[in-house]
Image (tube, rainbow, N blue to C red):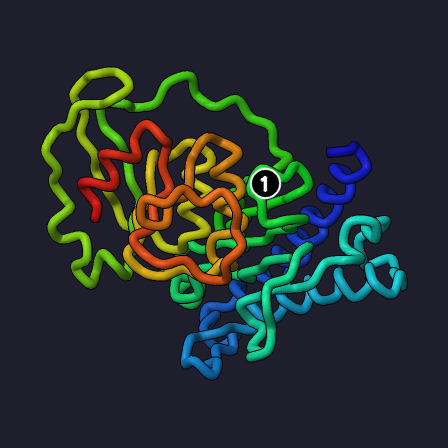
Amino acid sequence: MSNQNQNQYIEIKNFLINKINEEFKKTFSHDNFENHLKKSHKTDRSVVTHIDIFISKLCETLLTQAQVQDQDQDQVQNQNSILKNYTLFSEEDEDSNRNLKFPALILDPIDGTKELSMGIGECALSFSLFNSPELSDPLNYGLIYNPFTGFTIDSLIDFTPAKNYFSDNLRGFVSITEWERGLFHNHINKAPFKRTDTNENATATIMPVGSIAFKLGLLSAGIGDFIVSFKPKNIWDVAAGTLLASKHGFNFYEGKNHITSLEKEKYFPPLYWCRSQDAPYIFEQYS
C-alpha cells in the first residue's frame, strides 16, 4: 500500500470518527437520550436510529464527492483516487435491487443497534473499503470503532501481538441474543482437550458480548481467541472485522469451509473465527 493511500485512509478515518463523536455527544448528553435517538423500524421490522442514518449519509457523501470531485472544507481532502470507483453496500440501503459490486464500501453504521438504543457500550461502526473480495488484497481497508469507549482498530494501526496467549484456556465470544435464547446452553462447561500444536491439555470458556463487529474488533486486538455464531450474518456485519481478524492470524469459517474471499452477501451458520490450530477443537465442541 502506498503512502498516499495510507494518508487518505487516515483522513477518511479521522473524518468519520470526528463526525460520529460530535453526533454521539449531541445525542447522549440528554438524560432521555432514547427520545433523541429517533428510533424507527425498517421494512423488515428491525430497528434503526438517526445515528445509523447519519453515518450512512456521511459515507454516501464521501462517495458522491469523490465521484463529482466537488469538495469543501468540511470534507476529506484528496481522497478521490481511492473512492471514485467505489459503490456503497450498506445495511441502511433498502433498495431491493442492490447487489454487491467491487470495489465496494461495505458499511454497518452501528452494528449492535439494540445495545446502542440502550446506551450500552457494546456496539461499533463497521466500515470497510474492499478493492476486491480477497481478504489478502493489500488495498483493502477495515475500521472498527466503538463511539462509547473509543476502542479503535483498523488496517493501518501497527501493534505488536503478544508472543503467547492463554493456550491452556481459550477465551471465546458469543452473541448475547444467542446466549439468551439458550443456543449455548450445552456449551458452557467443556471438558479439557489435547492441543494439536503443543500436545498439552487445555479448556475453553465463552462469554456473551454484543455486536459481532465489536467482537471481531476485540478478537483482532488479541483480547479473545475465537468467536462462534449460530445465526446468519450479512457481509456488512462482518466485512471489516473479518478483514482485520485475518490480518492478525484468525481465519473465518462457514461450517468447516475456510473463507478467504468475501464474495457473498450472506454467510450461514455455524460460523467461526479462530486460529487454524484451534479450529478442529472449536468445530467439534461448538457445532
**Quadrant of residue 226 in the image?**
top left
Residue 80 pos. (x, y %):
83, 53
Q: How many marks?
A: 1
Task: Find residue 275 and report its horizontal and vertical position in percent.
Answer: 37, 32
- Would you name the residue on which mark 1 appears? 154
Q: Can you say whether 175 is above or below 5 in the image?
A: below
Q: Is residue 153 left or right of residue 14?
A: left
Q: Nearer the viewer, residue 216 or 39?
A: 216
Left or right of 77, for residue 202: left
Give the residue at x 78% y 49%.
82
Residue name at image x 41 percent, y 58 percent: 267
| Residue lying furthest front | 257
Which quadrant is home to the N terminus? Answer: top right
Q: Amino acid at mark 1?
A: Asp
User: Does dot 1 land on a helix, a strand or a loop?
Assistant: strand
Q: Is residue 187 left or right of residue 250?
A: left
Residue 202 x %, y %: 18, 25
Figure check: 42 above or below 177? below
Residue drawn at point x = 59 percent, y = 40 percent: 154
Q: Name the foreground residue: 281 vs 177.
A: 281
Q: Is residue 237 left or right of residue 183?
A: right
Q: Nearer the viewer, residue 61 or 284?
A: 284
Q: Residue at x 47, y 83 (%)?
A: 43
Quick check: 43 above or below 210?
Answer: below
Say few, some or many: other residues with alpha carbon within 10 Å of mark 1 (under 14 / 14 to 19 / 20 or more).
Answer: many
Q: Nearer the viewer, residue 34 or 51?
A: 51
Up-down relation of residue 46 to residue 181 (above or below): below
Residue 187 image position (x, y, % from top left): 15, 46
